Amino acid sequence: MPELTAGQSINKALSLILESNQTAFIAGEDIGIYGGAFGVTEGLLEKFGNERIKDTPISEDVIAGLAVGASMTGSRPIVEMQFSDFIVNAMDPIVNQAAKLHFMYGGAVNVPIVVRGASGAGTGAAAQHSQSLESWFCHVPGLKVVTPSNAQNAYDLLLHSYVDPNPVIFMEHKLIYKVKENVTLNPIPKDSSYLGKASVEQEGTDITIVSYSNMVNVVKEAVALDELQNFSIEIIDLQTVSPIDFETIKNSLIKTKKLLVCQEAPPNSSVGTTVISKVVESDLFNILEVAPKLISGLHSPMPSAKHLESTVIPQKEDILNAIQDML
């Protein structure tokens, strides 16, 4: 069981995919000779050649259009958006084409593409390179949206995304790229049934905390603080934010009767507000002992300066205070 960063585990998953399927290829900006802006595709050009590791122009629209057309004619493209912020330049091929074609052709066409993108803040990359835009894609029927939080689930979720017959948006938070853990290098699964399933990272009975992406790691840091050692806290990593695994959330709330949702993204029309609204409009509302609470990023462009950036992103102290208020 090798010790890998999330960046390295994604690299391993990509290599396994390319070895197993000659129709699979990767395309994106600087993914070949340079090895990707974050080093995730390092070494793949030398191993698989430039017919399958394709450096592209700086045009997200072209990259996504290439993927849609290739997938419809029998290939399995995995494309990288160097920063997920600029997926906005590819909204037409992703939202109006990839997400719609299976439905519009009456199921006769599949669009098996994975769109990878580095997301999130915490690196001082400022307002145009630090956004968490996953909820945009959650609004689009026909897309699955995946948000790994660590090296192991980044590896597993990417393999499941690859075998899904239709498009998957795969958001990789930049802060997980360098965090190491032991990773089990599982084989390629037969189907994508793991997508849409949450992971209970820690069991507890006093409060349920639902989170995803790198914020799961911030939640774990908060829960490990001395002030909370006398409490039993359940942590749920959504892993996939479209679809959302509400069954796992329901089973947890039946035990804990308290819900805290933590996300880096701003609160407006977000994953967190969807989780809370779904709980409130269900029978679970009647068993809650306190009102559900959302800890989120501020509705603000992301500053570059570290001390300002940390005021926009939820910190472990913010989560600690929220938990203490609810217990």
Image (tube, rainbow, N blue to C red):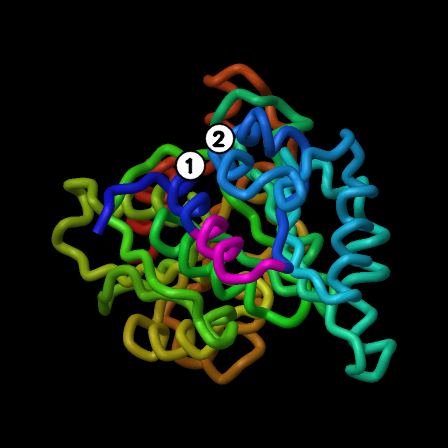
Q: In this view, does 87 lie to the left or right of 178?
A: right
- Please say whether residue 21 is one of the residues in the magenta stretch: yes
The residue tagged 2 is 39
What is the secondary structure assignment of the residue under circle 2?
loop
| Residue 320 seen in render | yes
Q: Position of residue 160 (x, y in %)?
A: 49, 65
Residue 97 in the magenta stretch? The answer is: no
Instruction: Check the picture and name the quadrant holding the C terminus.
Output: bottom left
| Range of residues picked out in magenta | 13-22
| Foreground pick, 120 / 271 | 120
| Horizontal relation, residue 151 to residue 107: left or right | left
Question: What is the quadrant of residue 58 in the picture?
Answer: top right
Label placed on residue 177: 1
The residue positioned 51% from the left and 44% from the top of the image is 172
Residue contact between numbered discs 1 and 2, judged by CB atoms under 8 Å: yes
Residue 124 horizontal/vertical position (percent): 53, 20
Q: Which residue is drawn at 51% across and 37% down?
A: 41
